[in-house]
Image (tube, helix red, strand yellow):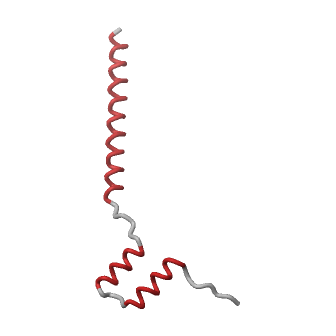
Amino acid sequence: MIELATGLVILVAGTGSAGVALAWLNDRRLAASARRSPRLDPKAILETRFAKGEIEEDEYNRRMRRLTYGPPLELD
C-alpha cells in the first residue's frame, strides 16, 4: 500500500514539474518574440528620410511611386 502511495506522489510531482517546465519554456518563447523589433514599413522609412532631409522631393516621389505601383513595365 505504501508503495502505491509513493508511486502516486512521484507521478503527481513529476507531472506537476513537467507542467511548470513547459510553462517556463513558453514564457521564455513569448519573451523572446516580444524582444524582436517590429517589421519596419518601407513607406514609413521613406517618409522619415524625407522628413529628415536625407533625400530630396523628386527622389522621395520616385521611390514612393516604385513602392506603391512597382517597377515600370518593359514592353518589347
Q: Residue at x 33, y 78 (%)?
A: 48
Q: Is residue 65 above or below residue 41?
A: below
Q: Is residue 36 above or below residue 12?
A: below
Pick the residue in front: 13 or 29.
Answer: 29
Image coordinates of residue 14 in percent, x first then y, are 35, 29
Q: Residue at x 38, y 89 (%)?
A: 57
| Residue 71 location, quadrant | bottom right
Q: Is residue 23 above or below residue 51?
A: above
Pick the residue in front: 51 or 9.
Answer: 51
Pick the residue in front: 19 or 47.
Answer: 47
Q: Is residue 28 left or right of residue 64?
A: left
Image coordinates of residue 4 in percent, x first then y, are 37, 13
Q: Is residue 59 above or below residue 12?
A: below
Q: Residue at x 36, y 55 (%)?
A: 33
Q: Residue at x 36, y 45 (%)?
A: 26
Q: Is residue 65 left or right of residue 26?
A: right
| Residue 18 location, quadrant | top left
Which residue occupies the extreme right position in the image?
Answer: 76
Count numbered badges in the picture: 0
Locate the N terminus and report the quarter of the image it occupies: top left
Which residue occupies the extreme top position in the image?
Answer: 1
Locate the C terminus and report the quarter of the image it occupies: bottom right
Image coordinates of residue 72 in percent, x first then y, are 58, 85
